Amino acid sequence: MKKILLPFVLSALFTGCSLDGDDGNNGTNGIDGAEGKIGETGPAGEKGDQGTPGAAGQPGVNAHAQLTPVLVGRAVLNAQSPEGAAEIVGYHAPSQRIFALNSSATPATVEIIEIGQMDTDSLTKNARGVITGTNLQSKETVNLNEHESGDANSLAIHGNLLAVAIAKETGQAGKIAFFDISASKPVFIKSVSVGYLPDMVTFTPDGAKVIVANEGEPKGDYSIDPEGSIAVIAINNGQVEDNATILNFNQFDDQMATLSKQGVVFANPTGRTIKGKEIKTTVSMDLEPEYVTISKDSRYAYISLQENNAIAKVDLKDNSLSIHGLGFKDWGKWTLDASDKDNAINFSSYPGLYGMYQPDSISAYQWQGANFIISANEGDGREYFFDSPDENTCLADGGLEYDKDDGCLAYTDEVRAEDLTLGNNFDYVNNDDQDIGRLKVSTVLGDADKDNQYEALYTYGARSFSIWDHNGYRVYDSGDEIGKITAAIHGSAFNNDEDENKGDTRSDAKGAEPEALAIGQINDRTYAFIGLERMGGILIYDVTNPFNVTMNTYMINRGLEADAEISGDLAPEGMVFIDQAQSPTGEALLVVGNEISGSISIWSLSSQ
């Protein structure tokens, strides 16, 4: 606030003095004096010396630019069965082509889309303000089954190399298939065996290594439970090595108690007998690597262990491995809508309720030369079924319950809060549809004294995104902003599901569900793009300084009219940022693979 200087006027008061005495007579009037002449003008004074120039002012600080997202490209793959047709996307800058993983096709394919020329005028909004048309299509298809059979889960591009992660049957090692994409038609190079269920693949920024997260999920009846692991494939002089180095977690098998105290979560049916087999789950078997990001200097790999609420770190110089538990979010200090049955936007705080961060996508960047990791805190529980002909057989085999559609439930750690007995510290709630009764929480945490009363509740995900430093300490969390922003913009349509238009549907289960994530630099600012799987929207935050994060804008291309058919782009799963220097339009672009709609959406990001 500017200060105003108020001038003050000082008045001088003069008072005359006299002695007491008789009044004298008036004197004779004097003679008028002669009128004086006006004096001549004096000579002009000399010009003074020029004053010393003032010091140069400090450069002005640019205000944070407001980004203006515009949908400039759109394609729909496998329109007859779009779900899973466009989950993971990559960009090949030299040819200006997008490579999209199409998992809805049988067998899986990679679709190639040219974006050098996009007729943006052909993308028009309908009466609901949603773009449903397309101006792009696949120009080339790679049939992965011609080279490697299995389920394709991920792809990545560096230079002229394309890597595709392909999973096999449970208990069989997966493969990474490599292609040369320098020509218009990709050329298969080789496949490299990695760990069980490769779920995500990426290149180091220098292109010298490929890092793979091998999730190692169990078979439905836990008869096979492979170890999770991380694979490192070296690339020397452009040549992919024939064998991968597999990093396992065996060194932590005797540290379950220590890791649990650090906030690492272990949920499994250890001690139970299923189909005649007693289940014994080790730390190595329970840890499930989900997603990989690499530091800018290619020195460190960070891997999200989603179900375990942790991040693993690999020093790629010597392949040493560490695990960092992420702890828990205190919902007594933030607010959330916990019920899908209260027919209202109802943000409340709940002391005793905690969130497991459980990030899916993570992405690394630097500030002041230090490494930071951004996480999209989606959350994920465990639920496994196996085939069974009927309820009696299911229960005899050690199953928990029978469902004619899903089969026999072998294990789950999910339960609704209303099905638990809560401790006295929860006397402030009714534990019903109007507060936390509908909320999905974990059965493995909260009953520390094993008396079947839960003194704490732990729910899945944090309904936020966070920033962590290199050592695994949290330096920022978006708190309850995602819920409040989407509620403010969409009103009663907030917390929608991705496959129907019914507001409040996901309030009991992870909310808008932040899952997809990308980081990009526009001019001198670094932005994080957080895709909301259920709502379909994408939040943009300025994260240039991880200790001073600001929300920038929000974009969405989805119809939300109640009970109307779903339309637009649904369930952002994978995203890739294209900077201005590599963009065919000269503007920064965000490419989004939308899982449910099978669409690829391309957003132009100009700054005002």
Image (cartoon, rainbow, N blue to C red):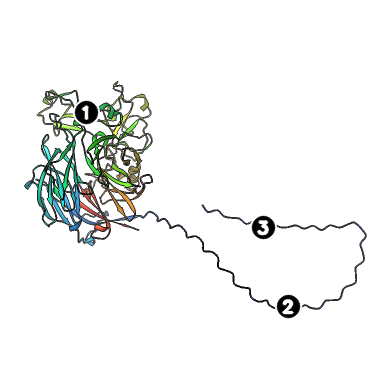
Q: Residue furthest top?
A: 451
Q: Could one spot residue 596 in this view of the protein?
A: no
Q: Residue furthest left?
A: 146
Residue at position x 90%, y 69% in the image: 27
Q: Are marks 2 and 3 in contact (CB under 8 Å)?
A: no
* Disc 1: CA contacts within 10 A as few (<14), some (14-19) or many (>=20): some
Q: Nearer the viewer, mark 3 or mark 1?
A: 1
Rounded to the nearest angstrom, the CA distance separating label 3 from label 1 is 84 Å
Above or below residue 473? Residue 86 is: below
First-in-chain label (1 vs 2)? 2
How far across and down, in percent of the image, does residue 117 sit? 20, 61
Q: Nearer the viewer, mark 2 or mark 3?
A: 2
Please identify the quarter of the rendering in which residue 38 is found.
bottom right
How far across and down, in percent of the image, does residue 226 sit? 15, 32
Residue at position x 30%, y 24% in the image: 448
For residue 9, the mark is 3
Q: In the rendered image, which residue does mark 1 sit on?
A: 253
Q: In the rendered image, which residue does mark 2 sit on?
A: 38
- Amino acid type, residue under disc 2 in the picture: Ile
- For numbered disc 2, what is the local secondary structure? loop
Q: Are marks 1 and 2 in contact (CB under 8 Å)?
A: no
- For numbered disc 1, what is the local secondary structure? loop
- Amino acid type, residue under disc 1 in the picture: Asp
Please identify the quarter of the rendering in which residue 306 is found.
top left
First-in-chain label (2 vs 3)? 3
Rounded to the nearest angstrom, the CA distance separating label 2 from label 3 is 34 Å
